[in-house]
Image (cartoon, rainbow, N blue to C red):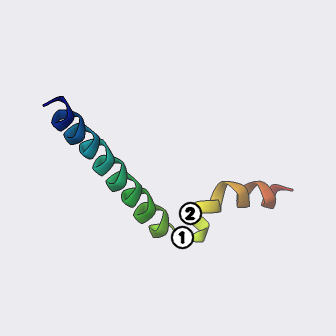
Amino acid sequence: MRRLVFAIALLAVASAGISASFAAVHHAKSLTFAERFAPALELMAKR
């Protein structure tokens, strides 16, 4: 019984981590180059 509960908890944590990583990848790809590097580009322009 303990193994079953542990396995279910482990599966829930793993699936949450996988879905969070897919969400992060999707969000990262949706940004343009200017949106990603705007702070760095502003600092380079000031020099």
| Circle 2: residue type | Glu
- Describe residue 25's horizontal placement relative to residue 32 as left or right: left
Dot label at residue 32: 1
Do labels 2 and 1 touch, CB within 8 Å?
Answer: yes
| Circle 1: residue type | Thr
State which quadrant residue 26 falls in. bottom left
Looking at this rendering, what residue extends furthest in the left direction?
A: 1
Task: Tell which of 37 and 28 is nearer to you.
Answer: 28
The residue tagged with tag 2: helix, strand or loop? Answer: helix
Q: Position of residue 3 (x, y in %)?
A: 20, 34
State which quadrant residue 24 falls in. bottom left
Looking at this rendering, what residue extends furthest in the right direction?
A: 47
Q: Position of residue 15 (x, y in %)?
A: 28, 51
Separation (CA) of disc 2 from disc 1:
5 Å
State which quadrant residue 25 falls in. bottom left
Q: Which residue is mark 2?
A: 35
Position above or below: 14 against 1:
below
Q: Residues within 10 Å of mark 2 (few under 14, many from 20)?
A: few
Task: Tell which of 4 and 8 is nearer to you.
Answer: 4
- The quadrant the C terminus occupies is bottom right
Q: Residue at x 30, y 42 (%)?
A: 13
The residue tagged with tag 1: helix, strand or loop? Answer: loop
Position above or below: 15 against 27:
above
Position above or below: 43 against 4:
below
Q: Residue at x 59, y 61 (%)?
A: 36
- Describe residue 22's horizontal placement relative to residue 15 as left or right: right
- Describe residue 35's horizontal placement relative to residue 21 as left or right: right
Q: Position of residue 33 (x, y in %)?
A: 60, 70
Q: Residue at x 72, y 61 (%)?
A: 41
Task: Tell which of 27 and 6 is nearer to you.
Answer: 6
Looking at this rendering, what residue extends furthest in the top direction?
A: 2
